[in-house]
Image (spheres, helix red, strand yellow):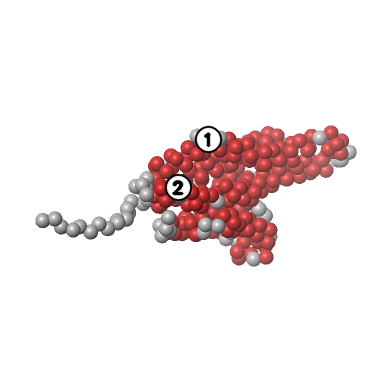
Amino acid sequence: MASNVALYPTKNHRWFSGFGNIFSKENHQWWGTRKWLIQVAIWLVLINGMVLFISVIMPNLSKTEQALQTMSASEAAEIKATFVSQGLTYFFIMSGMVAGAGVAIFAQDALIGEKRTGTAAWLLSKPVSRTAFLLAKLAADAIGILVTIVIVQGVIGYFILRFGTGASLHVPDYVAAMGLVVMFLFFFLSLTYMLGTLSNSRGLVVGIPLLLLFLANFGNLVPVLAKIMPWNLITDMRYSPSMAIMLAKGEPLTFITPIIGTAVMSVLFIVVAAWRINREEF
C-alpha cells in the first residue's frame, strides 16, 4: 500500500560546505583577469608615485638644491629630514586612509551586486552554505587587497624610503607597521561586507565606511571613541602620533587599545554578517 510521505526542507549545518569552489571562483576574478594588475597600477601611482615625488624628486630639484646650498649644514639636514618625514607620513596615509576608501568602494558590490543579479540565489541553490559563501568572498578579497595594496606597495615603498631617501627603516619594524595597515584595511573590508548583508543600498554600504574615514579628522573631539577606533593605527591623534609611523621608526607603542578595538570590531562585523546572511531571503 502506498503511503504519503511529507517532504520537509532541511538545513545544511556544514558551515564550510562549498567554500573551496566559491573561493576558487573569487580568486579567479582576482588573478585570472586583469583586476590585480589594475589594482597594482592604481595604488602604485597613488601611493608610491607621490612618495617618490615628495621624498626623492622634490629634494633633488635644481631649485631645492640651490636653496639648500644657501643654508647651514644643520638647516639643510633638517629640511631633508622633513622631506623624508613627509614621505613616510604620506605613504601610511595613502596606504591606510585613502586605500581604506578604495576598499569600501570596490567591496560595496561584493554582496549587493550578486544579490541584485540573482547570482547569490543561484549559487546558494547549490550545495553551498551561506556562511561559506560569505567567508569565501571575504577571504578572496582580503588576499587580493593584501597582495596588491599591502605587499606590493609596501615593498616598493620600503625601497623608495630606505634607499631613495636614506631613511633608517629596519625591516622587522617596517613589517610590523605594515601589519597595522593590514588591520586597518581589513576593518573596512569586513565593515563593508557586514553592511552588504544588512542593506541593499549601495549608498549606505559605501557611505558609512567613508563617513568613518572622514570622522578621523574629528576623532580628537571624542577621545574615548578615538582610542578604540582604527584611526590612530594610521594617522596622528591628539594623544598619540601615528602608531604605524612609530613602529616603522622603531619607537615603542605607549598603548594598544586601538589595535584591540580594531581586531574585536572586525571579528564582530564578520559574526554579524554571517548571522544576517543566514536569515536573508534570496
Mark sitting earlier along the chain (2/1): 1
The reply to whether dot 2 and dot 1 touch (C-beta < 8 Å) is no
Front position in the image: 29 or 98: 29
Question: Would you say 34 lies left or right of 273 here?
Answer: right
Mark seen at residue 119:
2
Front position in the image: 230 or 75: 230
Rendered residue at 63%/40% (across/down): 43
Residue 90 position within the rendered picture, expressed as x and y whole percent measured from the top left: 69, 46
**Quadrant where the C terminus lies?**
bottom left
Residue 144 position within the rendered picture, expressed as x and y whole percent measured from the top left: 53, 41
Amino acid identity at mark 1: Thr
Disc 1: which residue:
33
Amino acid identity at mark 2: Thr
Q: Which residue lies furthest to the right in this view?
A: 70
Labels in figure, total: 2
Residue 135 position within the rendered picture, expressed as x and y whole percent measured from the top left: 44, 49
Compute the Cα span from label 2 to label 1: 19 Å
Front position in the image: 183 or 198: 198
Residue 201, by quadrant, is bottom right
Residue 211 position within the rendered picture, expressed as x and y whole percent measured from the top left: 63, 58
